[in-house]
Image: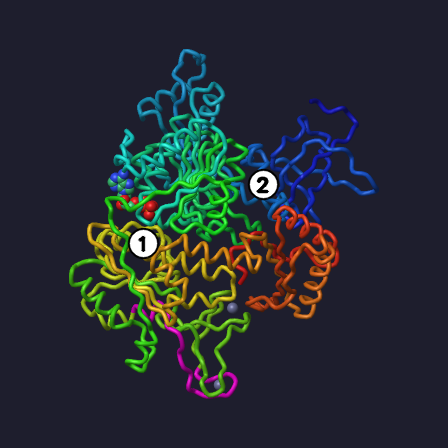
Amino acid sequence: MKPEPGVPRYASIAVPIPLRRELTYRVPEDWQDPPATGERVRVPLGSRQVVATVVEPTVPEPAGDIRVKPITERIAGAPMLPSELLELTRFVADYYLCSWGEAIETALPPQVPSGRLRRRVVRTGVARSELPARAVRQVALLERLETSGGVLGWDRLDEPARRAVQGLVKRGLVAVEVISGDSPGDDPGAAPHAEPGPRPTAAQEAVLDELFPAIDGGAFETFLLYGSTGSGKTEVYLRAAERTLAAGRSVIYLVPEIGLTPLLLNTISRRFPGQAVVMHSALSPRERLAAWRRVRRGDARLVIGTRSAIFAPVRNLGLVVVDEEQDTSYKQDETPRYNGRDLAVVRARSAQGIVLMGSATPALETFRHARAGHYRLLRLGGRVASRPLAEVVRVDMRETYKASGEIEILSPELIAELRACVERGDQALVLRNRRGWAVALLCPTCGERVQCPRCSLTLTWHRSVARLRCHACGFETKKPTACSRCGSEDLKEIGQGSEQVEDRLAQVLPDARIERMDRDTVRRRGAHEALLRRFDAGEIDVLVGTQMIAKGHDFHRVTVVGVLSADQSLGLPDFRAGERTFQLLTQVAGRAGRGDRAGRVIVQAFDPEHPVIRLAAEQDYEHFYEREIRYRSTLRYPPVAALVNLIVRDTDELRCRTWAKSLADALRRQEPGRLILAGPGPAPVERIKNRWRQQILVRTAGRRRLVRAVDAALDEIEGVVPRRAIQIDVDPLSVL
Ligand code: ADP
Ligand code: ZN
Ligand code: ZN
């Protein structure tokens, strides 16, 4: 459409700031073509220039007396979202109550100045006769390509050769590719032929018999693959992926954390050589962009990645696998606070694809959907090769205390099991879900605990680096010599973290090779994988750590698992405390006995009879579910009701309270009698990084209604409470 001279044109543009509306800009007169939907442009915003996205290329002139600013420039060659993903980001904005621009930024790969990428030239056509004889350089370049096997690194070309490449690209004879970093598909050692997987077991067969017709049928449906740890869910995912790829469609395979899946990545590169690409946030921006481009071009049809991979620009999406669907890492803990698992359903619905979620301990939301028939439940019975689930023994730490008069880190029962395990040449895992040496420093004289100066939290003592650290804001300091309140020099360490457990293990198992895995020891890139590899290779006897050790690994020599302070997390003021504890215990227990030998799990607790601990020990998810859902129904908490967690934050305490009150008042005016409001009141952590935090929890039966009501309330207080002071979490996984 050619512009009519003299008639100004306008476009609607999504800007990446917390503003629930798009803005209208004028299209510069000298633009030949109108902007495209999804095109990236630079626009003035206040005194800044920001990169934003055209969401509607032609809109009417805005009414009223506003001066509409022109678009500054288009950004040529920038990655653009296909329309399907643009729609998905619109959904994210509407559902999670952020701006469309913010949602788009989340879905796009990072901005990398072009030209800095590693690129290579590949031959795509053969018809050299098309070339005119005078195109000497182009002919010479094609010859060079031929002698080098059809591929040439961009860096090896001089300026004239690069210009020749441009000419050949126009003729369709070569293509310039961005080289992605470490995706399994790029592994030069990858087998040229797809390696077959093991023969499915009868139980896997039965599940696949239900899945395959759905995959072939090509209509949207969500499945929940429910099977205990070690039941062989991964093989079902892989077969489903194979089937989908064979049908010419694409697959997104979501995992909680890439660092936890070196073996899976290996399997995938052997089973799907050249077809897979890895997308996750630990890649460098350049690698992420390269992976994104490969997927966008259709060169890789199997994307494996963490939650943001749900935005992978695959074409013709046929299947989304969500492994360990209950995992909290699927929820982003910054704006937009989306859940990758839930977006999988949204995206698959619009693409008419299948969602395959899997878990041994499904989120209550998910199991409830399955019970209600919204998701098709696939039970994967038993463990592969009939390996029994590990036997779980609960140890009452009150008895241990009675016997020794001390709060012991390790019970005699666990010590005995660990010794026998190491003697047999087996391996053990010990879970202590708190890092550091001591949870806090207490002054027993006056009762003061050493606090973070910026947060309302105690500092954790990390003895190995001799620092006190705040786990919320990262503040660090030396250990004080005296109490800041009363001056007493007698400061006591309370609560034992993973560092201290490691130390204690070394005392009772002097000959064992012990290592620790928590956020402190895996800070370096690759450290995580290295530890897992060494454990898998048998170079470590006992691995102690936080919940990191509980997830997903398939170690075959682990026969003992110890769980310390199993009941501690039950006391947290969060309605999901029981669910989280149950999931963690079941998961870590599932790490034992995955090889030929049976496993034993020792669970230490001061309240070992607590129903959650008992049901987890029995690995009885369904009873746990019944019990938990009753409690949620009574209190009207998710999944029985929808919930939004609103936190108002400000450096000034009074202002923070005033704003929270305005927000609560506005909420009360919506849907009177229908919304349940708790708050405003101080959030469980009242101050983080010098900002006060007031919390409001809003609940009601319908999700859509709730989101609309919150949106309307936010609109009402626009101009009264700044939008950026309000943190909005729809379907929160934690209210702490
Ligand atoms: P889950 O994901 O359900 O916890 P995994 O997929 O890790 O369980 O499977 C447990 C173990 O069984 C793994 O070692 C896996 O290699 C093995 N396994 C799974 N399916 C088969 C099969 N069909 N034949 C042989 N071994 C299998
Ligand atoms: Zn004191
Ligand atoms: Zn702090």
Q: Is residue 262 visible?
A: no
Measured from the top left, where is residue 74 in percent x and y? 63, 35
Q: Nearer the viewer, mark 1 or mark 2?
A: 1
Task: Name the mark on residue 590.
Answer: 1
Is 340 on the left-hand or right-hand side of 529?
A: right
What is the secondary structure assignment of the residue under circle 2?
helix
- Separation of residues labelled 1 and 2 (CA atoms): 37 Å
From this view, report whether residue 142 is shown above or below residue 39.
above
Badge 2 is on which residue? 89
Q: Is residue 9 visible?
A: yes
Quadrant in which residue 612 is drawn:
bottom left
Measured from the top left, where is residue 206 in percent x and y? 33, 35
Q: Amino acid at mark 1?
A: Gly
Is 539 on the left-hand or right-hand side of 114?
A: left
Measured from the top left, where is residue 713 in percent x and y? 71, 54
Q: Nearer the viewer, residue 631 or 532?
A: 631
Which residue in the rendered view is the most extreme toward the right? 65
Report whether the residue tagged 1 is closer than 8 Å to ligand 1: yes
Is residue 495 covered in magenta? yes
Report whether the residue tagged 2 is closer than 8 Å to ligand 1: no
User: In this picture, which residue range is highlighted in magenta?
Assistant: 481-502
Q: Nearer the viewer, residue 256 or 54?
A: 256
Is residue 604 covered in magenta? no
Q: Earlier in the sequence, mark 1 or mark 2?
A: 2
From this view, report whether residue 51 is shown above or below residue 710.
above
Is 38 on the left-hand or right-hand side of 422?
A: right
